């Protein structure tokens, strides 16, 4: 069965459910519903807090300095994640705008 995302007036996802149709959601639950696709290339699966843009979904912005790439549908940091073989995980530090261990 398809998955459906309920949207608020700002196109932000309130919940995601499995249901037979958009019409079923509207008639039984009210609200505005958009289909979301699980494991479908070119589509981002909706989650609570995601924004619906042109029938696709964008996750919340992880940090103010990150920008959104509409070709890949991913948030991009101002500095790419370091590519090294150390195996040490890094996290983004928004205050210094760099990756730290």
Image: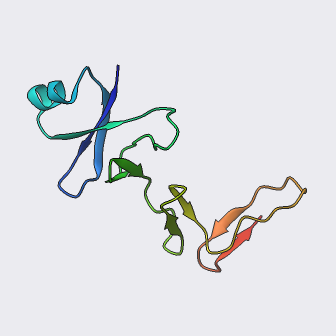
Residue at image coords 53%, 75%: 65
The N terminus lies in quadrant: top left
Is 14 situated above or below 78?
A: above
Q: Where in the figure is residue 63, as x and y percent of width and height? A: 51, 68
Residue at image coords 44%, 40%: 45
Locate residue 19: give its quadrant.
top left
Q: Where in the figure is residue 88, as x and y percent of width and height? A: 83, 56
Specify whether 39 is left or right of 21: right
Locate residue 93: give its quadrant.
bottom right
Is 55 situated above or below 81?
A: above
Q: Residue furthest right?
A: 85
Q: Where in the figure is residue 29, as x and y percent of width and height? A: 14, 30
Q: Nearer the viewer, residue 4 or 55?
A: 55
Locate residue 91: give its quadrant.
bottom right
The C terminus lies in quadrant: bottom right
Residue at image coords 30%, 47%: 13
Residue at image coords 64%, 78%: 97
Please name the colour scheme applied to the rendered image: rainbow
Q: Where in the figure is residue 92, as x and y percent of width and height? A: 65, 66
Specify whether 15 is left or right of 56: left
Q: Nearer the viewer, residue 12 or 96?
A: 12
Q: Nearer the viewer, residue 90 or 57?
A: 57
Number of numbered markers: 0
């Amino acid at each position: 069965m398809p998955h459906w995302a309920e949207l608020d007036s700002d196109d932000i996802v309130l919940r995601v459910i499995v249901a037979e149709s958009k019409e079923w959601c509207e008639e039984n639950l009210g609200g505005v519903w958009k289909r979301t696709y699980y494991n479908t290339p070119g589509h981002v699966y909706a989650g609570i807090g995601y924004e619906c843009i042109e029938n696709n979904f964008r996750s919340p912005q992880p940090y103010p300095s990150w920008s959104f790439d509409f070709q890949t549908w991913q948030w991009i940091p101002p500095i790419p994640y370091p590519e090294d073989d150390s195996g040490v995980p890094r996290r983004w530090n928004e205050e210094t705008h760099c990756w730290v261990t």
